[in-house]
Amino acid sequence: MRILILTKYFPPEIGAPSHLFYELSESLVGRGHQVTVVTGFPTYNADKDKLDRKYKKGVLLSETMNGIKVERLRELPLPTKIPVLKGLDHFVVALIIFLRGLFIKKQDIILVYSPPLTIGLSAYLISQLKKIPFVVNIQDLFPQNAIDLGILNNRHLVRMFEQMERFVYRNADYITVHSRGNKQHVVNKGAEPEKVEVVPNWVDTEFIKPADRMNRFRREHGLGEEFVVSFAGTMGYSQNLDVVLESADRLKEYKDVLFLLVGDGVKKEHLERKAEELNLENVKFLPMQPRECYPEILHASDVSLATLRREVRTPVVPSKLLSIMSSGRSVLASMNLDGDAPRLIEDANCGICVEADNADELSQAILRLYRDQSLREKLGKNGRDYAEKNLSRKVCAKRYESLFAKAKGDY
């Protein structure tokens, strides 16, 4: 089968959005399919100083990555840390991907990564012009998540994006979501229930697997024998890492407990200032690390965090949660307890969930895990077992393969 994937994010960019569809593409190629990815030049979580020279010049670039054909078209360099310009960037990206996708020879199926939701419009136009079905994978429930966070509050823009959301949902041949709660939201917004499939996000259980905590990463960054509570990923509005710093402030007296925050994002400077103001010597910041270092960060951790602020009412399952489970480390989640992620943690019995934005509860949960090594080990083993059985790349690639065959047969 010839599969066309449209996405804003792709390696060498670092982070879950980039590698989720790279891993799926790689698995589909391994199963005998031809995969072509249309994307932009690397900008998201990409270290410009370390990028290959081929990404620093030109407007068009064709390359092959592990059997995946990648077609790139350069985007406009908009400063996306400004919310209004980030919104504009989503439309620019959709236009660029549509234009590049037009010149790809006819495929059998289109798969879209959303966000941004605007790429769903690109897929619809290509689908109509080339008479092929398209599937949209919804990762973030936009615009609802932006409304919940207070980023989007103009009623005219809200109405426009909600109309776009309904249009994409109604016109996609199939929609995939990563949890039951997300399916219900998508159906409530106009999608036909029989067109919405729950396919959990996958994790590369071969790339991220259990290993010893006393590793190279600990030695290189001077972590010694410390009890490490880590967060690795995007430091944005949704994550509310302030609650982690507030917990660190409450646990100052525990001299062997270290909070390790690894990554970048629009809130990182604020967090660094706050840590300095609170004189938090038990907090260590590191920049975003190369993908190959990510398993070592998890291995070096005693507990790993997944956080979402109270205003995030949409049923989000953070991708870092799956990575933590695969690594055999216990999960500590701070988020609304009625969402899909707490249900997953309960089903797998792989961690502890506390209410979002509650630094007292988070601090007490950290102390519970700090004092009980056997509990940490049990939760970590449970998470690994669950990931292997339900969340591996192989399992999820097969489900997409079956869905593509069904969409192609329906068209």
Image (cartoon, rainbow, N blue to C red):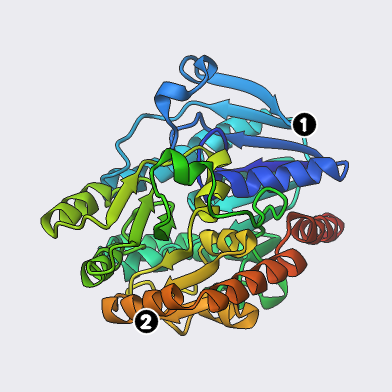
Residue where numbered disc 1 is placed? 67
Mark 1 is surrounded, within 10 Å at the Cα level, by few (under 14), some (14 to 19) or many (20 or more) other residues, namely some
Q: Tell me: 82 left or right of 377.
A: left
Examine the rendering and report whether any part of residue 183 can be seen. no
In the rendered image of this protein, does residue 109 appear above or below residue 280? Answer: above
In the rendered image of this protein, does residue 390 appear above or below residue 217? Answer: below
Q: Position of residue 365 (x, y in %)?
A: 39, 79
In the rendered image of this protein, does residue 156 appear above or below residue 27? Answer: below
Question: Which label is found at residue 30?
Answer: none
Q: Position of residue 63 (x, y in %)?
A: 66, 23
Examine the rendering and report whether any part of residue 92 can be seen. yes
Q: Residue at x 46, y 18 (%)?
A: 56
Q: 282 or 85, which lies in front? A: 282
Q: Tell me: 45 left or right of 311.
A: right
Residue where numbered disc 2 is placed? 355
Instruction: Indicate the quadrant where residue 155 lies.
Output: bottom left
Residue farthest front in this picture: 225
Q: What is the secondary structure assignment of the residue under circle 2?
A: loop
Image quadrant containing the N terminus: top right
Q: Earlier in the sequence, mark 1 or mark 2?
A: 1
Q: Position of residue 26 (x, y in %)?
A: 74, 41
Q: Residue at x 40, y 81 (%)?
A: 354
Q: Residue at x 41, y 50 (%)?
A: 224
Image quadrant containing the C terminus: bottom right
Q: Amino acid at mark 1?
A: Gly
Q: Residue at x 49, y 63 (%)?
A: 165
Query: From mark 1 to mark 2, how far is it between C-alphas?
Result: 44 Å
